[in-house]
Amino acid sequence: MRLNFERPKDSPLNILRRMGYSFLKHTPQGEMSFVKRVGYDDFPRFHVFSKMDQKGNVSLTLHLDQKGASYGGSFAHSGEYENEGVLEKEAEAIKKEFLNPKL
């Protein structure tokens, strides 16, 4: 699921951290990767990729990782990418925070 925000008042790093997301890594595509556990285990977890353009606009890609990679040497995993259920609720919470960040 893709979410776009025009020049938010705070950085994606700060907003997502306030929401309970942990920074995971920088990707080769220039994105920042964040995860947020749904329960006590590593999976399922929300996974967000964030990218900011030169104008300060932010693009997020959100999905729900159901489990980790199931075979060696692969990054593929089972996930939910559509606008439904718990993913939709998390997307709404992210929209609310990006539009009205608690500075």
Image (cartoon, rainbow, N blue to C red):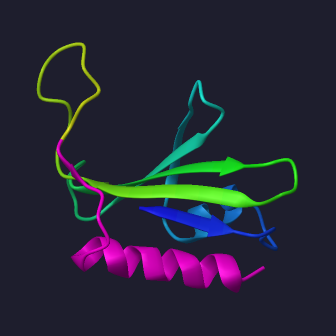
Q: Quadrant of residue 45?
A: bottom left
Q: Residue at x 76, y 70 (%)?
A: 6
**Image spot of residue 58 (x, y percent):** 70, 59
In the displayed structure, would residue 18 be above or below residue 45?
below
Say which of 35 and 50 sits in front. 50
**Image spot of residue 11 (x, y percent):** 75, 61
Q: Is residue 55 magenta?
A: no
**Image spot of residue 83 (x, y percent):** 32, 72
Pick out the residue farthest to the top: 73
Q: Residue at x 54, y 66 (%)?
A: 3
In the shown orientation, is residue 67 left or right of residue 58?
Answer: left
Q: Quadrant of residue 29?
A: top right
Number of numbered discs visible in the structure rendering: 0
Q: Which residues are magenta?
A: 78-103
Q: Residue at x 58, y 85 (%)?
A: 96
Q: Is residue 88 magenta?
A: yes
Q: Residue at x 56, y 57 (%)?
A: 60
**Image spot of residue 8 (x, y percent):** 77, 71
In the displayed structure, would residue 68 be above or below residue 14?
above
Say which of 71 and 83 sits in front. 83
Pick out the residue farthest to the left: 70
In the shown orientation, is residue 2 left or right of residue 102?
Answer: left
In the displayed structure, would residue 23 be above or below residue 9?
above
Q: Quadrant of the N terminus?
A: bottom left
Pick out the residue farthest to the right: 55
In the shown orientation, is residue 69 left or right of residue 20?
Answer: left
Q: Quadrant of the C terminus?
A: bottom right
